[in-house]
């Protein structure tokens, strides 16, 4: 009986591992697509200053 329970536990764990492996693959694929889109976008407007420069100027 213990062997059957152990077998079922391992089967459930394997199914869970397969599910999350596929989920992680989809997340990684979406991240790569996002990075590709961002890399393909034109450069920022020349008058645009990074946020931290705006913050530093407002502290003065």
Image (cartoon, rainbow, N blue to C red):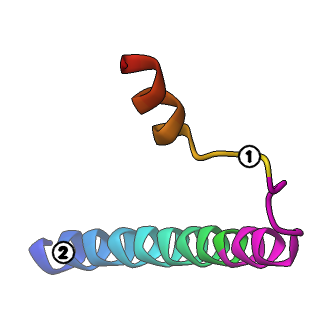
* Crowd class of label 2 (few under 14; some 14 to 19; many from 20; radius 10 Å): few
8, above or below 56, in the image: below
- Horizontally, residue 1 falls left or right of residue 45, namely left
Residue 3 got which mark? none
- Badge 1 marks a residue whose secondary structure is loop
- Horizontally, residue 46 falls left or right of residue 9, namely right
- From this viewpoint, which residue is outermost toward the top? 59
Residue 34 part of the magenta-drawn span? yes
Q: Which quarter shows the C terminus?
A: top left
Q: Nearer the viewer, residue 60 or 34?
A: 60
**Residue plotted at (77% across, 75% down):** 33
**Residue plotted at (89% across, 69% down):** 42
Q: Looking at the picture, how far across and down is residue 9, in whole percent?
A: 26, 69
**Residue plotted at (84% across, 54% down):** 45
* Crowd class of label 1 (few under 14; some 14 to 19; many from 20; radius 10 Å): few
- Badge 2 marks a residue whose secondary structure is helix
Q: Which quarter shows the N terminus?
A: bottom left
- Closest to the camera, between mark 2 and mark 1, is 1
Residue 6 got which mark? 2
Q: Quadrant of residue 25?
A: bottom right
* Helix, strand or loop: magenta stretch: helix
**Residue plotted at (67% across, 72% down):** 26
- From this viewpoint, which residue is outermost toward the front? 60
- Numbered disc total: 2
Which residue range is magenta in the image?
32-46
Q: Looking at the picture, how far across and down is residue 6, in whole percent?
A: 18, 75
Q: Looking at the picture, how far across and down is residue 15, in whole percent?
A: 47, 73
Q: Nearer the viewer, residue 4 or 57?
A: 57
Q: Which residue is mark 1?
A: 48
- Horizontally, residue 53 falls left or right of residue 28, namely left
Q: Nearer the viewer, residue 26 or 13?
A: 26
Q: Looking at the picture, how far across and down is residue 51, in whole percent?
A: 55, 38
């Amino acid at each position: 009986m213990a062997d059957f329970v152990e077998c079922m536990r391992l089967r459930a764990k394997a199914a869970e591992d397969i599910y999350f492996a596929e989920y992680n693959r989809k997340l990684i694929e979406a991240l790569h697509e996002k990075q590709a889109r961002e890399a393909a976008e034109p450069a920022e407007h020349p008058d645009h200053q990074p946020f931290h420069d705006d913050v530093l100027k407002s502290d003065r």
